[in-house]
Image (cartoon, grey):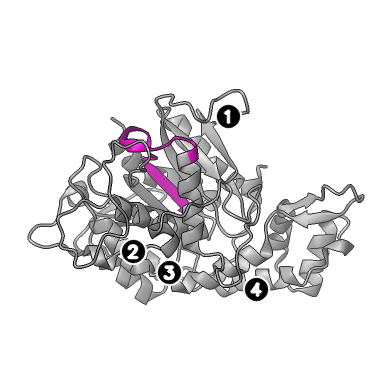
Amino acid sequence: ATKDKLQPSTIDHQPSTINRMISIGRSTIIHKRANYFIPSISALIRRRQGHCRRQKNNFSVSSSASSGAGGNILHHEFIIDGKVAQSGHHNYNHHDGRQTVIFLHGLLGSGKNLRSPAKRLTQQYPHLKALMLDLRGHGQSPAVDVDQSQKHTIQNCVLDIIETTKTLNLTGFDQSPIGVIGHSFGGRCALQYTHTLQVLNDTSPCPSPSPSPSPSPSLGSTSIIAPPKCTWLLDTVPGKAHESVSNVIRALTKVDLSSIRSKSDLVKVLTTEQNIDKSIANWMTTNLRKTSSGDGDQFEFMFDLDTAIDILDDFPKQNFMKMVEDCTSFSDTTSTGTCKMYLVMAGRNNAWTDDIVSNLQDIDQLGLVSLPKAGHWVHVDDLDGLMDAMDECFMDLHQ
């Protein structure tokens, strides 16, 4: 089994309100695996007439973004034709004619967690390649030293993504990534990535009483990254993190790794001393690695807990709903056109409350997808349903 198949759902509960959703003013497509609540194609591509719901001054980016401060280069790998591109097999800076889709993992995970959907996507669409990133303090991307007054935030994670994309020369209209897919926390980063690039590339005629946060060079410039044409948020719930996530992180802070001599030791400590579900404890063993100090069987986590805690604290500070409204109403005068945004909801995740779902349904251009049988790890629990949902989007982008 691959690592991503070892991931349990920390928030699998009884079916929630999304399985009772009624599509109002939208095309509803019923599929054997997934229930789709997606705007019609004409609704997705039409531009709003007579008004602009998004005013430039309503967009916001961090001061570091507006001042031009860069992020950090993240560990990354490419998946091409369904296979991980090994060193020497593919020149990461070479423009090979394939278009790029970025994949962003969840909290305490790594880019490897999303290999299965990335392999399926690049097999089905050979003109695409998947860029798998380890976000800061996760996987093989090291933790970043920050001043105590400047904690790790979602926006700073986005600056890392932008810096890495620029380093790989994935810039300009022809080479910028055409899509971004993020799971859970990765979905928050995907949303903010799209939002930030729309701000930096905004050329729409809406009035702006305040100066633009950054100059808006032509998308033909090789130093500019165009906003993605489609953004997928996989079971990314607005607001604060689910209590189960906080419980896992709290439990991990109490683990004395010096006493852990095997992966089974970690499972025992988490289940018996911290009351963590065994399936979650087993998944946590995939995040263990032996230290480089050579001290026998000494282990360390493949993530930085301080970074994860900071990011978790930033969850409720993200203006999620407003960003979704901004991104879905964005259209510019360049050929990048309208942003398509989709949010996939796990049917067994009871964090999707009636209020949240109702607010999302009020966003005209947002495509909502329900996977009734899936838990939080939708790409594991219902990979076929997820890929079927994505098919129409990427088929439309295939020119």
| Amino acid bearing label 3 | Gln
Q: Please indicate whether residue 366 sits to the left or right of residue 305 in the image.
A: left
Q: Which residue is mark 2?
A: 323
Q: Which span of residues is magenta-colored?
A: 167-182
Q: Earlier in the sequence, mark 3 or mark 1?
A: 1
Q: Secondary structure at mark 2?
A: helix
Residue 302: x and y in percent read 70, 53
Q: Quadrant of the C terminus?
A: top left
Instruction: Check the image and report above or below for 133 versus 57.
Output: above
Q: Residue 85 — which label? A: 1
Alpha carbon distance from label 1 to label 2: 34 Å
Q: Is residue 50 left or right of residue 178?
A: left
Amino acid type indicated by mark 2 = Met
Q: Position of residue 393 (x, y in %)?
A: 32, 43
Q: Are marks 3 and 1 in contact (CB under 8 Å)?
A: no
What amino acid type is highlighted by mark number 1?
Ala
Q: Earlier in the sequence, mark 3 or mark 4?
A: 4
Is 205 on the left or on the right of 72, as rendered?
left
Mark 1 and mark 4 in contact? Answer it, CB < 8 Å: no
